[in-house]
Amino acid sequence: MPRTAEPTRDRIVAAAAKLFYGSGIRAVSLDEVAAKAGVTKRTLYYHFRSKDDLVAAYLSVRDQPNLALFRRWFEETGGGVPEKVRGLFRHLARSARHPKWKGCGFLRTSVEYAELPGHPAIRAGIVHKKRVEAWLAEVLTADGIASAPELARQIMLLLDGCFAVVLLHRDPTYMETAGDAAFELVTAARAR
């Protein structure tokens, strides 16, 4: 089996991430993950006690990079906070136009584990979504918006809603429309 300089645990998580995001958690076996990572199943179990632990690790490693991407998109978008918030949705729409785009890994996983509210993957998804919401509230508060926590929650609903609708329709313009709605909400909140 091929060896790389990348630590074994990281290789396993990277392989799982590709397979889980591409095919769904329940559709992928641990044998497939081990083969893609170039390790034995025994080695996989040395690093992860169960598939549940591997799923939680897959989501945990997506958390900070996804949040960093949102921050980068926000900063790269010109204009004030309303334009920057709309820019998040525009960037998401551009990503959704890529043929390999499969939506939000956190939301897709939550659907697969909907009947297990205490599952480690559900907890990892909650942590991520709360971090994004807290970051939005922080940005909105810094802009002087008194209703920042409530507005951040509304924007989260628009974000997660457009992920779901775009997955159904395969039409990224829904993200652009959600961005326009977020722009209007932020603009109205700034005027109060």
Image (cartoon, rainbow, N blue to C red):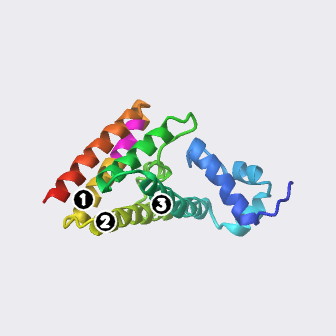
How many C-alpha atoms fall within 10 Å of the one at disc 3: few (<14), some, or many (≥20)? some
Q: Which residues are magenta?
A: 160-166
- Alpha-carbon distance for marks 3 and 2? 14 Å
Disc 1 marks which amino acid? Leu
User: What mark, if any, has residue 35 been given in the picture?
Assistant: none
| Residue at 37 percent of width and 40 percent of height | 175
Secondary structure of residue under mark 3: helix
Callouts 3 and 1 close, C-beta under 8 Å? no
- Alpha-carbon distance for marks 3 and 1? 18 Å
Callouts 2 and 1 close, C-beta under 8 Å? yes
User: What mark, if any, has residue 151 been given in the picture?
Assistant: 1
User: What mark, if any, has residue 67 been given in the picture?
Assistant: 3
How many C-alpha atoms fall within 10 Å of the one at disc 1: few (<14), some, or many (≥20)? many
Q: Main secondary structure of the magenta part?
A: helix
Check if residue 98 falls in the magenta segment. no
Q: Is residue 177 left or right of residue 40?
A: left
Secondary structure of residue under mark 2: helix
Callouts 3 and 2 close, C-beta under 8 Å? no
Q: Is residue 129 left or right of residue 82?
A: right
- Alpha-carbon distance for marks 2 and 1? 7 Å
**Viewer-nearest residue: 131 or 59:** 131
Q: Position of residue 77 (x, y in %)?
A: 42, 51
Instruction: Give the residue number, with chain letter if any, for mark 2.
Output: 137
Disc 2 marks which amino acid? Ala
| Residue at 41 percent of width and 31 percent of height | 171
Q: Position of residue 91 (x, y in %)?
A: 45, 45
Q: Quadrant of the N terminus?
A: bottom right
Secondary structure of residue under mark 1: helix
What is the quadrant of residue 165 in the picture? top left
Q: Is residue 170 above or below residue 83?
A: above
**Viewer-nearest residue: 80 or 33:** 80
